[in-house]
Image (cartoon, helix red, strand yellow):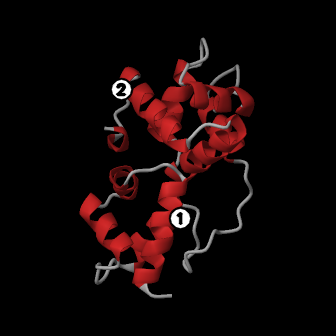
Amino acid sequence: MRLAEIGKSVRARREALGLSQEQLAKFAGLSRATINQLENGTLKDLGVAKLVNVLGLLGLGLDARRAPTPVRGLRMASRVASVSYKKPLDAKSLAQALASGEIPAGMEPHLTILLDEAPLQIVVRAVEEAARQEHVPAKRIWQNLARWASELQSPRRVWT
């Protein structure tokens, strides 16, 4: 598959996930202009490592088709967020929190770990799954995450 064809799939998947070009660029460690050029088919070369990273974040294989992955993004995200805590954050509560934007009482530390340390591929899958389960646009969940990152003072640069 050619880079221009992959770019079309990247755009479609990014939009389906409710991500902006700027958000995807931050997650991938690239510039927004690079993502824009990739999606518009004007990028001459990206490099395999960078391309694989972008595709992996979006849940796409190198052929830019959806990679066969188990849905369990919420479950994985809730486990990552609960590693150091006695009371775990369950997947259902996480989905509801992501959709509503309300942080469950006592779960601020869990969500801080999710925002600061969870692999971004897991966060992307959790957002997609929560949006589907809770019947809200993924874009709203991304807005909630950005607000939480500000409120919880996340040092992770992808949220700013």
> Is residue 31 visible in this depiction of the protein?
no
**Residue type marked 2:** Ser
Count of numbered tags = 2
**Residue type marked 1:** Gly
* Mark 2 Cα shell of 10 Å, populated few (<14), some (14-19), many (≥20): few
Does 58 sit above or below residue 152? Answer: below
Q: CA distance from mark 1 to mark 2?
A: 26 Å
User: Helix, strand or loop at disc 1?
Assistant: helix
Identify the residue at horizontal 53%, vertical 62% (top origin).
13
Identify the residue at horizontal 34%, vertical 57% (top origin).
25
Asked whether 76 or 31 is in front, the reply is: 31
> Is residue 109 visible in this depiction of the protein?
yes
Asked whether 96 or 12 is in front, the reply is: 12
Does 120 sit above or below residue 40? Answer: above
Which quadrant, please, contains the C terminus?
Answer: top left
Q: Is 61 left or right of 68, judged from the image as shown? A: left
Q: Position of residue 58 (x, y in %)?
A: 53, 60
Name the disc covering residue 150, or none.
2
Residue lying farthest to the bottom in this orientation: 1
